[in-house]
């Protein structure tokens, strides 16, 4: 007989044992500053990349710098000790490190690592865009100073170094 569903009458909230996957581990704890910083790093890094794609590099620099700071500070925190009132571990699972085996708990590591990667990618995109603008500064200055459309269109051929076609098609 299958287990009762939540919408069936008389359901009391019993869940069948999980036949697959890891045992449920520690959840996100908003009162833990390391986990909070890890989540902030991940969100800030992703939004930084998103704003770089949208063409707002100033926000990218701010968000990715914050993400880098939060990720590093979250990864540097000492691991928490498991709760004192944790249930005893069965001998079969005692060899595997888990949430209640007495091993230090660091649930912020995946989110902090993701935030660190996102921050580095966002800062690399920002540095690349900034480098292109610095290298082709004459081209950008020519476009900014152009008073007519004809002069604007000749900027691609009249400056040195000549910008690549993808930059000219992009609109400079």
Image (cartoon, grey):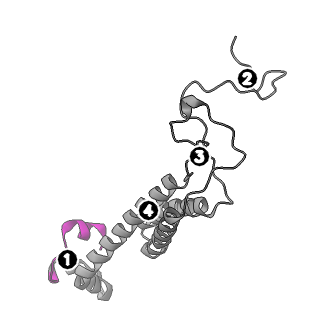
Residue picked out by circle 2: 5
The location of residue 52, given as percent across then percent down, is: 42, 67
Q: Does the CB distance between marks 1 and 2 fall below 8 Å?
A: no
The location of residue 62, given as percent across then percent down, is: 48, 75
Which residue is painted at 55% across and 35% down in the image?
94
Dividing the picture into quarters, in which one does residue 17 lie?
top right
Dividing the picture into quarters, in which one does residue 25 lie?
top right
Among numbered discs 4 and 3, the one appearing first in the sequence = 3
Per the model, the C-alpha gap separating discs 4 and 3 is 28 Å
Among numbered discs 3 and 2, the one appearing first in the sequence = 2
Residue 61 colored magenta? Answer: no
- The span shown in magenta is 158-172
Residue picked out by circle 4: 116
Q: Quadrant of the C terminus?
A: bottom left
Residue picked out by circle 3: 102
Residue picked out by circle 1: 156
């Amino acid at each position: 007989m299958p287990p009762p569903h939540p919408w069936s009458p008389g359901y009391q909230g019993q869940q069948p044992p999980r036949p697959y996957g890891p045992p449920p581990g520690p959840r996100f704890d908003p009162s833990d500053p390391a986990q909070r910083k890890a989540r902030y790093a991940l969100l800030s890094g992703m939004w930084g990349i998103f704003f770089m794609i949208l063409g707002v590099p100033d926000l990218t620099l701010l968000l990715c710098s914050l993400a880098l700071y939060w990720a590093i500070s979250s990864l540097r925190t000492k691991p928490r000790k498991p709760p004192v009132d944790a249930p005893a571990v069965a001998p079969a699972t005692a060899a595997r490190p888990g949430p209640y085996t007495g091993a230090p708990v660091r649930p912020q590591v995946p989110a902090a690592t993701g935030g660190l990667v996102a921050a580095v990618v966002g800062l690399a995109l920002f540095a690349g865009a900034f480098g292109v603008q610095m290298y082709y500064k004459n081209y950008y200055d020519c476009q900014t100073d152009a008073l007519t459309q004809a002069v604007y269109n000749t900027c691609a051929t009249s400056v040195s170094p000549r910008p690549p076609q993808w930059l000219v098609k992009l609109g400079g």
